[in-house]
Image: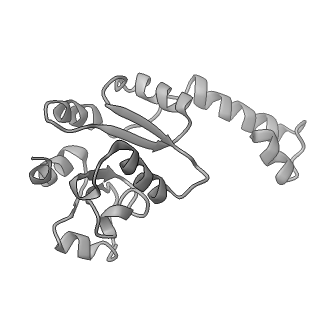
Amino acid sequence: ALRHTARQLDINEDSNLFAKALLEVEAIYTTLKPKIFADTAQFINACQNTNCFLVLATIAEREWTSKKLSWSGLSGKFNEVICLDVTTAKHLQLKNMLLNLGAWPENTLFIGDSLASDMYLVTSGKAYGAWVNRRPANYNNFAQAVNEHRLVMANNLISAANLASGWLK
C-alpha cells in the first residue's frame, strides 16, 4: 500500500522520504504502543458486570486491532471485535453491523469520540450515544439528540457510562 501511495504521489521508492515513511509504518506494528483513553479498561471491566453485549467496531486492520487490544490489556474483553473497512462510510457499516448482530438501534448505546461517524445513528434519531469529547466543543448539530435525551456528552468514559446508565438497564 505504501509503494502504491508513493507511485500516486510521484515519490521515488529509493528516496530518503520513502525510506523514512517505510520506517514509520514499520514502527506502528513493532514498537509504537497505541494510545487509548485512560479509563477504557475501567469502563470495559464495569460493562462486563452487566448484561451488555460488548462490541468493538473500529476502522483498522485486524492485525493492528489485535496488537492494540493485547498491548492495552483488553484482549478477550469484547463479545465481538469487528474491523470496519476504511473504504466504506463508517455509518453504513455500523448499520450493517447491527443487522448482522441482530441488534436494534433503539436498544444500542454507541460510545465514540467522533461525532460525525460514531454518533451518526444517534444524531439521525435511531440510537443512543455517549460522545466522549476531550476537547472544548462548539457543535450545534447534535443539539436535537441531546434534547431528546438520546445523546450525552462527557469528557471521559466513566462519566459517559454514568450519564447513559439509564439506557443500559
Give me the residue at 29% from left, 57% from top: 105
Number of marks in the rendered image: 0
Say how the picture is coloured. one colour
In this rendering, position of residue 152 left or right of residue 16: left
In this rendering, position of residue 72 left or right of residue 108: right
Give me the residue at 36% from left, 49% from top: 98
- Which quadrant would residue 29 be assigned to in this image? top right
Give me the residue at 35% from left, 43% from top: 101
Q: Position of residue 33 (x, y in %)?
A: 48, 28
In this rendering, position of residue 103 left or right of residue 117: left
Comparing 30 with 1, the one in front is: 1
Give me the residue at 43% from left, 59% from top: 117
Comparing 53 with 154, the one in front is: 53
Q: Is residue 29 above or below residue 140?
A: above
Q: Position of residue 30 (x, y in %)?
A: 59, 23
Q: Is residue 136 above or below residue 3?
A: below
Q: Is residue 145 above or below residue 97?
A: below
Q: Position of residue 119 (x, y in %)?
A: 35, 60
- Which quadrant would residue 123 be assigned to in this image? bottom left
Q: Quadrant of the N terminus?
A: top right
In this rendering, position of residue 69 left or right of residue 145: right
Q: Position of residue 142 (x, y in %)?
A: 30, 72
